[in-house]
Amino acid sequence: MFKTIKNNASSELIEKKSKFIGNIFYIESLEEAEEIIKQINKKYFDARHNCYALSVYTENGVVNRFSDDGEPSGTAGGPMLNILNSKGISNVLVIVTRYFGGILLGTGGLVRAYSETANNALESTEIIQKDLGLEVEFEISYSDLQKLKYYFEKQNIKIVDSTFEENVKIIFEITKQNLNNILDNKSNLSFSIINYKILKDKYIEI
């Protein structure tokens, strides 16, 4: 279980004519982060700096990375990473773009500007908790559809998609423990499961 952001967000700060643009993204892998960094570098190709910090779960544990992108060492990426770590936020990438305004800010001014921009972007979104769960498909009869929906609503199980064929196929997100509870107590459910498939592992909001 970990804390992360619900939606991507952005912020802007003007400090002594320098413009700082903060963008914060939910990510699930280093590869996804690298692709977003490339996109931001392309979008703000005319900016002086695109500094970033990230924290993401991997098979080998939590990985933290940052870049000052040409700013004095320790004035940009590091302070932004400290914000993420101090708030216990993971699976997040924050990038702050700087358009230089012609006035030097000094190391203290840079730390404050990058930290404030990153923190403002973070505060523009909602902090939620996620855990590694599953995306699962249940096949049920049409007569059981409303019973399943009512049960899922009571259990806070999120339906992702529905397909209406000979029977109804419901795709939903669920923790492994909750799925096991359902399958272990099938005889006590108000609906019958004709068939089920585990589609993939997935980080889900809890």
Image: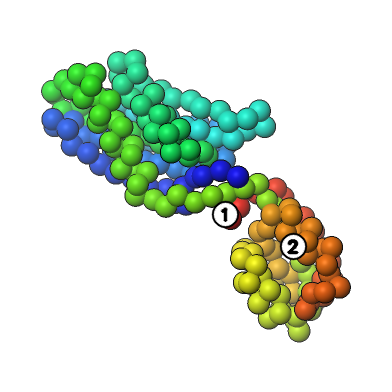
Above or below residue 99? Residue 23 is below
Above or below residue 46? Residue 130 is below
Most foreground residue, 142 or 110: 110
- Quadrant location of the N terminus in the rendered image: top right
**Apparent side of residue 30 relative to residue 46 in the rendered image (left or right):** right
Label 2 sits on what residue type? Glu
Mark 2 secondary-structure assignment: strand
Is any atom of residue 73 visible in this view? Answer: yes
Residue 60 image position (x, y, % from top left): 66, 28
Q: Quadrant of residue 146?
A: bottom right
The residue wearing badge 2 is 137
Above or below residue 50? Residue 199 is below
CA distance for labels 2 and 1: 18 Å
Which numbered marker is on residue 205? 1
* Residue at point 77%, 78% (across, down): 190
Q: Quadrant of residue 205?
A: bottom right
**Apparent side of residue 157 relative to residue 118 in the rendered image (left or right):** right
* Residue at point 21%, 34% (across, down): 19
Residue lying at the far top in this picture: please name it: 73
Label 1 sits on what residue type? Glu
Residue 183 image position (x, y, % from top left): 82, 63
